[in-house]
């Protein structure tokens, strides 16, 4: 684990988003980083498909059944 320096305004955005989405600030930043990495790796996939695939991979609810 390490420390990542981010701009104050981005930290504030993460803080506000984390409150709405019931995540810690660190969890929100990690989520954005993971989704960003996946979007760069799969530039033709829309956001919803990236999330659906992640949910299916984790065997979460309907997403897991839809992938089968």
Image: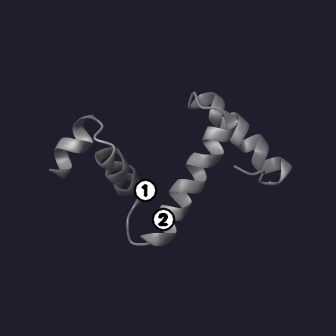
Front of the two marks 2 and 1: 2
Asked if 44 appears above or below 1 in the picture, the reply is below
Foreground pick, 15 / 1: 1
Q: Which residue is mark 1?
A: 47
Asked if 34 appears above or below 21 in the picture, the reply is below
Badge 1 local density, few (<14 within 10 Å), some, or many (20+)?
Answer: few
- Mark 1 lies on a secondary structure that is helix
Asked if 39 appears above or below 67 in the picture, the reply is below
Residue at left offset 59%, top offset 51%: 32
Q: Which mark is residue 10?
A: none
Q: Which residue is mark 2?
A: 39
Compared across the picture, whether 40 is left or right of 15 comes to: left
Location of residue 37 in the rendering, given as x and y in whole percent from the top left corner:
53, 63
Residue at left offset 31%, top offset 49%: 57
Compared across the picture, whether 47 is left or right of 60 comes to: right
Residue at left offset 46%, top offset 71%: 41
Compared across the picture, whether 10 is left or right of 62 comes to: right
Location of residue 7 in the rendering, given as x and y in whole percent from the top left corner:
83, 54
Residue 11 lies in what quarter of the image?
top right
């Amino acid at each position: 684990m390490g420390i990542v320096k981010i701009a104050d305004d981005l930290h504030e955005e993460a803080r506000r988003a984390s409150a709405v989405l019931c995540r810690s600030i660190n969890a929100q930043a990690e989520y954005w980083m993971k989704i960003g990495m996946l979007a760069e790796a799969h530039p033709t996939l829309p956001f919803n498909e990236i999330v659906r695939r992640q949910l299916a991979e984790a065997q979460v609810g309907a997403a897991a059944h839809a992938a089968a």
